[in-house]
Amino acid sequence: GAVVSQHPSWVICKSGTSVKIECRSLDFQATTMFWYRQFPKQSLMLMATSNEGSKATYEQGVEKDKFLINHASLTLSTLTVTSAHPEDSSFYICSATGTGVQTQYFGPGTRLLVL
Amino acid sequence: GENVEQHPSTLSVQEGDSAVIKCTYSDSASNYFPWYKQELGKRPQLIIDIRSNVGEKKDQRIAVTLNKTAKHFSLHITETQPEDSAVYFCAASLDGSARQLTFGSGTQLTVLP
């Protein structure tokens, strides 16, 4: 099956710093990537959808200037949490779909803790 | 937009018994329905999916049924095992290719040994 990797798996940072999370499709061309946020014992909340080479589409209530998404190639999307604050602490998961892929495949997630 | 409701939120069964999780969706145009299993701290993994031109699909101990008229679909797990314990999410998509999935709220399944 399709494989999606995500890096880092864990990050702890100080309030006010920026954090970049990478999402890579390893064995297929990811024409569309998705970024989700998940709080403990809750469902996946879609933050934004990005298509390769174009600007991301953000869901209502998600600040695009705070959560910067770049999908510059068919195998890589990045999410940058700018000026992170403790309330940004969460589990961030990417997923991808694309050529020859019939569903969304998820990355392993990144646990962000902002002190 | 699409709205997906999932029940129950928690489910405990004895090992060997069956488990059923139900989801309803609001948009009759939805045509793709995947189910994901998420173990604690790990990624959601696709376990089975069904498209709107099929009423039932089975893969070993897992089956999914779809009732388009009633706009609901269900996950059935038979002969449950402790390793089936996880959170299960249903989802619905309008475009058939999972580019726009709306997820249910999840069901925490616990299989008691």
Image: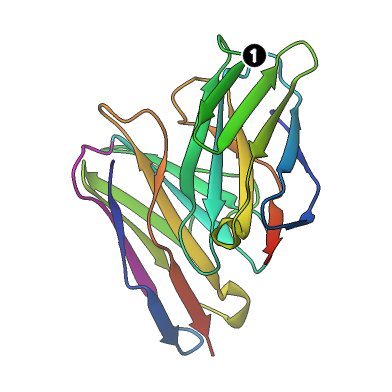
Range covered by the magenta-colored residues: A19-30
For image coordinates 43% across by 64% down, the residue present is: A109
| Residue A21 sits inside the magenta stretch | yes
**Count of marks placed on residues:** 1
Give the image location of residue B112, x and y in percent: 71, 65
Q: In which quarter of the view is residue A32 placed? A: top left
Q: Looking at the image, which is closer to me, A66 or A94?
A: A94
Give above or below for A81 relative to B56: below
Please give the chain letter of the residue carrying mark 1: B
For image coordinates 62% across by 14% down, the residue present is: B55
Give the image location of residue B5, x and y in percent: 77, 38
Give the colour scheme of this rendering: rainbow
For image coordinates 56% across by 39% down, the residue present is: B35
Q: Is residue A66 visible?
A: no
For image coordinates 27% across by 39% down, the residue present is: A30
In this figure, which residue is indicated by the disc labeled 1?
Answer: B29
Quadrant for the C terminus of chain B, please.
bottom right
Quadrant for the N terminus of chain B, please.
top right
Q: Secondary structure at mark 1?
A: loop
Q: Is residue B88 visible?
A: yes
Give above or below for B19 relative to A65: above
Please state which amino acid type lies under the numbered disc 1: Ala
Give the image location of residue B50, x and y in percent: 54, 23
Give the image location of residue A36, x and y in percent: 51, 54
Q: Looking at the image, which is closer to me, B72 or A9?
A: B72
- Label 1 neighbourhood size at 10 Å, few (<14), some (14-19), many (20+)? some
| Residue B86 sits inside the magenta stretch | no
Q: In which quarter of the view is residue A88 placed? A: bottom right
